[in-house]
Image: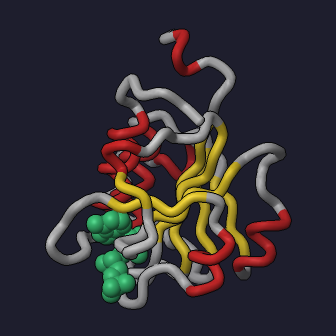
Amino acid sequence: MNDNFVNEFFGIGIQNGKTPENLGVLWRTAQNLGASFIFTIGNRYAKQACDTHNAVKSMPYFHYENFDEFCNNLPKGARIVGVELDEIAQDLETFHHPRRCVYLLGAEDHGLSKEAIEKSHFLVKFKSELSLNVSVAGSIIMYDRNLSKPRS
Ligand SMILES: C[S@@+](CC[C@H](N)C(=O)[O-])C[C@H]1O[C@@H](n2cnc3c(N)ncnc32)[C@H](O)[C@@H]1O
């Protein structure tokens, strides 16, 4: 195991995801890029054909009814990293990912809720003209985490 990745973990999920296909793609990427768990807030996941590696049966999947429930059940010491194309967000290129964190992506139509943006410990974005598909955005974040970058 790469020593850089000792004593750390991450989870990734979506707040009020609308499209089960997007979740299936995100879960498959999460399983293959080192996530420890996946989650949904609000809308629940229904199994999709595009989750061809059956990630949802291979790693813990948590569901939270709302944002408060999510916050109250965070793993101890984990930081919330909101992922949103927002002017107050930090640039991914220079972002130091926390050792232990959960990445929270927004809904396909409305993005992250105001509450989620305000309560995230960090907010991160990457350059794109318009916002990307949510599962593509999650894949970019996980790929970047796996680069040998300093942690916060
Ligand atoms: C299709 S986008 C949401 C678009 C929504 N209509 C809006 O403007 O807020 C779905 C999610 O993908 C993620 N996303 C897409 N592009 C992004 C970017 N350039 N930087 C950070 N997150 C991005 C965010 O989590 C976003 O909530």
Left or right of 147? Residue 43 is: right
Query: Which quadrant does the C terminus fall into?
Result: top right
Q: How many marks?
A: 0
Left or right of 73? Residue 118 is: left
Residue at x-position 24% and y-position 70%: 132
The colour scheme used here is secondary structure
Is 3 drawn above or below residue 17 in the view shown? above
Residue 121 or residue 80, whichever sits in front: 121
Residue 10 or residue 114, whichever sits in front: 114
Q: Quadrant of residue 80?
A: bottom right
The single residue placed furthest to the left in the displayed view is 129
Residue 72 location, x and y as percent?
A: 85, 66
Residue 19 or residue 35, whichever sits in front: 35
Residue 37 or residue 51, whichever sits in front: 37
Q: Quadrant of residue 84?
A: bottom left
Is 56 drawn above or below residue 39 in the view shown? above
Residue at x-position 43% and y-position 45%: 95
Is 100 drawn above or below residue 3 in the view shown? below
Residue 49 can be seen in this image: no
Residue 138 location, x and y as percent?
A: 38, 56
Residue 55 location, x and y as percent?
A: 48, 47
Left or right of 22? Residue 6 is: right
Residue 117 can be seen in this image: yes
Residue 13 location, x and y as percent?
A: 54, 62
Residue at x-position 62% and y-position 18%: 6
Q: Quadrant of ligand 1?
A: bottom left
